[in-house]
Image (cartoon, rainbow, N blue to C red):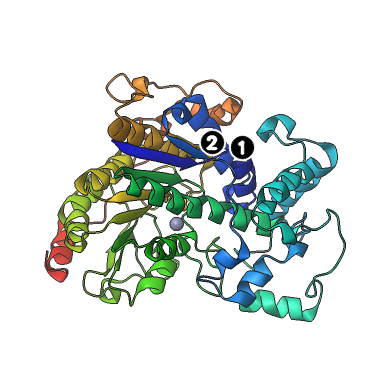
Amino acid sequence: MSYVAIATSPFQSAVADLLPCNKYLKSRLTHALIEVYGLLDHVDECIVDAVAHRDQLVQFHQREYVDTVLNEQHNRVQLYDSDGETGWNYLNGVALEWGETGEGVDQCGFDSWKELFQYYLRVSDEITPSRKRPLDSDDDDGISGSEAKEEALKVFNLEGDCPIFSYLPMYVRTVTGATLQLADCLLRKAALDKRFIGMNWDGGRHHASKGKASGFCYVNDIVLLIQKLRKQGTGKVTYLDFDLHHGDGVERAFKFTKKVQTISLHLYEPGFFPCTGSLEGSSGFDTVNLPLQHGLTDSFLQGLVDQVVNPLIQRHGPEVIVIQCGGDGLLGDTFHEWQLSIRGLTKCILDVMSHSTQAHVILLGGGGYNPTLMSRFYTYLTGRILHQFKNTDPFPGMNGAQEESLIRDHKYIECYGDDEHYKFWVYSIQGSQKHRTLREENTTDQIDKFIKFYSI
Ligand SMILES: [Zn+2]
């Protein structure tokens, strides 16, 4: 029997949604939907308030970079450029309103940003009591407002799509702490001879590198997790990345380590971020790139997993598989590049888990820019994992032909209204306005090419 742990809570979700690209919704919708389907009743352990400390972050990241990101000056509502086109001032508006009027009381269980931050300080103080500082302190930590600050932000790429946003240090430490806590759980359960399955849908920040933020990723919790697992005595690890974008930060970190296999399947074409991940950029079967075209369908992905991904993982023989479950390749995502369905992507992930029955598995989030699509995806995936690996049926309406078609009533139900009509499967209903089919540009020749290239 597997031991299943998940890192999720109203606290973690409220903090994770500070990330501007989460649109102040993604994580809270996910937590609420997982809760309303009763999934938390079936997990063995729920991690609710893990917070990483600086010393853990510098295990991979440069000290100067970490110190800049964690600068306490950033633990407050930030004033953004008022240029409406950037979109960041939307969050700022929410932040100011919530902080000053108490809006959000029934949204996530905290009255204000201050209350949320105070909770964070209490939780983090258990680990680092010396780092507490008074709220509303106007002390300048040395770089605010100076030219040096601007220069530092440029060097660390803390601009563009990776701006300093409100409470950035709290966000970074909370999301990373949740991922790292899963490594501790794994160690405890592996010692008891149980297969461990851990989840943190707020993690999976695969683009961040040692001294640079990139693509909405500030701290690479995946690299930190794998390093921690290796330090704890884990032998071989496989990292598998389902995100629409190449998992460049993780690949770079482990390029020269045979013990860690990285496999990334992603859209690859000139000019598409992060512009890396070609087949030629692969090396042996430790650094695997599976570059794909537009329009990826469930059936193509299934073939790729069966014929290429699973055999490559089997060849490596990992003790732990870390899976990045980015959902920006789903039909209904704002990128609109691939057309995977929630069921199709979920099945591929489950097949990888079933194929390597000896390996522990840690599943993390990633990209995905339609919050109501992502909450559906992570809720369904969590439910299916519990169904398959805990022999429970927390989701009786969603496992077969009788799948429930309407989102269950809960406090965020209105987010699923309007043109979505509260339907769970709105994006996969044939004929619905939301179901737009793209041309599948991937061909079976590509799979044959991969098989030949990797000598499978
Ligand atoms: Zn992505």
Along the line of sight, the residue nearer the viewer: 376 or 208: 208
The residue type indicated by label 2 comes to His
Q: Residue furthest front?
A: 192
- Label 2's element? helix
Nearer to me, 382 or 162:
382
**Residue 291 falls left or right of residue 214:** left
Q: Please rate how many residues cluster around mark 2, counting C-alpha atoms within 10 Å: few if below 14, some from 14 to 19, many from 20.
A: many
Ligand 1 sits in which quadrant? bottom left
Inspect this view and state whether residue 422 appears.
no
| Residue pictured at 49% horizontal, 55% vertical | 180
- Location of mark 1 (residue): 10
**Residue type indicated by callout 1:** Pro
Q: Position of residue 224 (x, y in %)?
A: 47, 63
On screen, 384 above or below 221?
above
Residue 250 in view: yes
- The quadrant in which residue 443 appears is bottom left
Secondary structure category for the residue under label 1: helix
Reading the image, the residue beneath label 2 is: 31
Q: Which mark is residue 56?
A: none
- Picture coordinates of residue 298 (x, y %)? 27, 44
As drawn, the residue found furthest toward the right would be: 138
The x and y percentages for residue 102 are 81, 36
Q: Are marks 1 and 2 in contact (CB under 8 Å)?
A: yes
| Mark 1 vs 2, N-terminal side | 1
Dividing the picture into quadrants, the one containing residue 378 is top left
Residue shown at 60%/29% (left/top)?
Answer: 412
Q: CA distance from mark 1 to mark 2?
A: 7 Å
* Quadrant in the picture for the C terminus: bottom left
